[in-house]
């Protein structure tokens, strides 16, 4: 039997409904904050990621799916979404439009990760980028949209960790500070961090190996080394968050794993997932478009790991999203069998979702199936009903039965309290 590649997943019904529901909330919320969808290719020239994410990052160094196409050009399955958005902004001259542009995306990303819980080789991100605004207000708006999204899903326990990564000049100085502090303790660092100390010392601060964390604890925080401009910028972002009542913690160790960031950086952590599986990460990237050969256009954005999000989705949201969203229409007898699709089509046209019993189950078997699959409403159509142009409707949640005229079904359906349509969710 052929099996799917390691680190990939099949997204099956009914769980796919959770993904659809989450994505609908993302479109709703990010759209309400002025966002519009952008779809960029799943593969890009390899050089795009080398120049944006950064040559010495783990992602570029060891996690990219890179391959030559038939003409020998090096292509890479996108490991993240921001680089493609920046490239598209440049290539399509989006700078000619009124700025800023708020763009969101939902789609698969690819990283050759070591297998671990919450780490996949194909995973989905929900991202939002604001390009063309350099104000602290832009960062705050982005964070407010993100916070609103999590609230709509019912999250109450997420933590936003925020830090100032300084400006690129500060970072160059900070690299020297890290090297000076850690060079004498080189032997205490893991093999990766010994390499990082030479290539990209900032990344040592982010290493999860305990001995590296002990050594890194003595390094001064970047914010202490950073210049006034970046400190003031992040302080203003914090003031906006406080005014909005959006809770956050200042995490002076937060550095992020991609090179394009400066000033504001943040991550969202779920107590259920812990710090090894971050739910969302983002920050400001004012030099990215210039580094790709364009003008100096600022940007700020984040991406949420959708796979991880689904894993810790609040129960209430899950239940509602999983409730079977249809009337189960069961024809009983030959005449009803002939008429049933016409009836179903008429209801569908009126906005009533209908699942027709098409395998010829008996009433008893159909009711059993309805219960098993979490239907709230079973509509039975027999000879008598057909003659009276009604269906006998059993509400499984309320354990009641009524006769409903064909034409009254749309109103009946609309009046059902959606909140109690949860039967499927009660199943293990
Ligand atoms: P990132 O921190 O590399 O940032 O990824 C963002 C989120 O994607 C992570 O917090 C995590 O939830 C999810 N993620 C990453 N790798 C995996 C994986 N192997 N399996 C499952 N989930 C994963 C970025 O990608 C930036 N482009 C975010 C950004 C947008 N910054 C500015 N704009």
Image (cartoon, grey):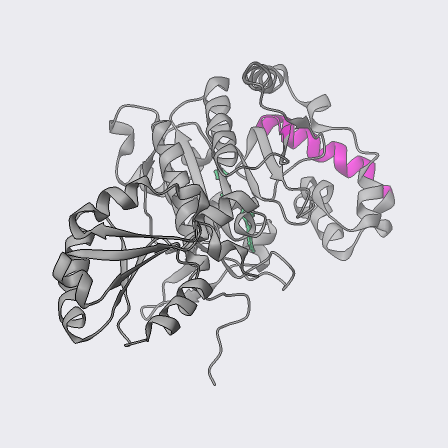
Question: Residue 89, image x and y in percent?
Answer: 32, 37
Quarter of the figure with residue 239: top right
Question: Residue 356, image x and y in percent?
Answer: 26, 65
Q: Give the range drawn in magenta.
A: 162-184
Q: Is residue 303 above or below residue 307?
A: above
Name the outermost residue toward the bottom. Answer: 1
Question: Residue 174, image x and y in percent?
Answer: 70, 31
Relative to residue 183, is residue 232 drawn left or right? left
Relative to residue 191, is residue 232 drawn left or right? left
Residue 181 falls within the magenta-colored stretch: yes
Q: Which of 277 and 334 is in front in this view?
A: 334
Residue 64 falls within the magenta-colored stretch: no
Q: Mostly what secondary structure, the magenta segment?
A: helix
Rendered-image quadrant of the C terminus: bottom right
Relative to residue 271, is residue 129 drawn left or right? left
Q: Which residue is drawn at 70% across and 48% down?
A: 196
Query: Can I make out residue 11 in this image?
Result: no
Q: In this view, does 328 lie above or below 303?
A: below
Question: Residue 69, image x and y in percent?
Answer: 35, 67
The number of discs equals: 0
Q: Which of 186 and 367 is in front in this view?
A: 367
Query: Can I make out residue 198 in this image?
Result: yes
Q: Which residue is drawn at 84% across and 49% down?
A: 211
């Amino acid at each position: 039997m052929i099996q799917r590649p390691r680190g990939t997943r099949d997204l099956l019904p009914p769980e796919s409904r959770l993904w659809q529901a989450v994505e609908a909330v993302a479109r709703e919320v990010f759209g309400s904050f002025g966002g519009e969808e952008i779809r960029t290719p799943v593969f890009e020239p390899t050089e795009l990621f080398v120049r944006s994410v950064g040559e010495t990052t783990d992602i570029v160094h060891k996690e990219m799916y890179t391959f030559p196409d038939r003409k020998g050009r090096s292509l890479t399955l996108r490991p993240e979404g921001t680089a493609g958005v920046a490239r598209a902004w440049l290539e399509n001259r989006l700078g000619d439009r009124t700025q800023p542009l708020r763009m969101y995306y939902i789609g698969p990303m690819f990283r050759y990760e070591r297998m671990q819980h919450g780490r996949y080789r194909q995973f989905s991100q929900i991202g939002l980028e604001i390009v063309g605004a350099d104000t602290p207000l832009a960062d705050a708006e982005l964070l407010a949209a993100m916070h609103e999204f999590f609230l709509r899903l019912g999250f109450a326990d997420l933590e936003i960790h925020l830090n100032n990564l300084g400006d690129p000049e500060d970072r160059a100085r900070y690299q020297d500070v890290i090297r000076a502090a850690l060079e004498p303790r080189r032997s205490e660092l893991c093999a990766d961090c010994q390499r990082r100390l030479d290539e990209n010392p900032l990344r040592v601060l982010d290493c999860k190996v305990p001995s590296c964390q002990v050594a890194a604890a003595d390094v001064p925080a970047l914010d202490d080394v950073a210049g006034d401009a970046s400190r003031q910028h992040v302080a203003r972002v914090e003031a906006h968050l406080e005014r909005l009542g959006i809770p956050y913690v200042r995490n002076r160790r937060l550095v992020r794993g991609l090179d394009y960031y400066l000033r504001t950086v943040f991550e969202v952590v779920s107590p259920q997932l812990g710090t090894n599986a971050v739910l969302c990460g983002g920050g400001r990237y004012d030099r990215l478009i210039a580094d790709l050969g364009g003008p100096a256009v600022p940007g700020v954005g984040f991406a949420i790991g959708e796979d991880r999000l689904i894993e810790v989705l609040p129960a209430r949201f899950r239940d509602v999203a999983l409730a079977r969203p249809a009337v189960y229409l069961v024809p009983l007898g030959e005449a009803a069998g002939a008429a049933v699709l016409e009836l179903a089509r008429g209801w569908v046209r009126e906005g009533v979702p209908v699942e027709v019993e098409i395998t010829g189950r008996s009433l008893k078997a159909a009711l059993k199936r309805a219960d098993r699959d979490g239907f709230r409403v079973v509509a039975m159509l027999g000879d008598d009903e057909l003659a009276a142009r009604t269906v006998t409707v059993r509400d499984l949640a309320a354990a009641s039965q009524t006769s409903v005229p064909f034409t009254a079904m749309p109103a009946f359906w609309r009046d059902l309290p959606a909140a109690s349509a949860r039967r499927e969710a009660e199943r293990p």
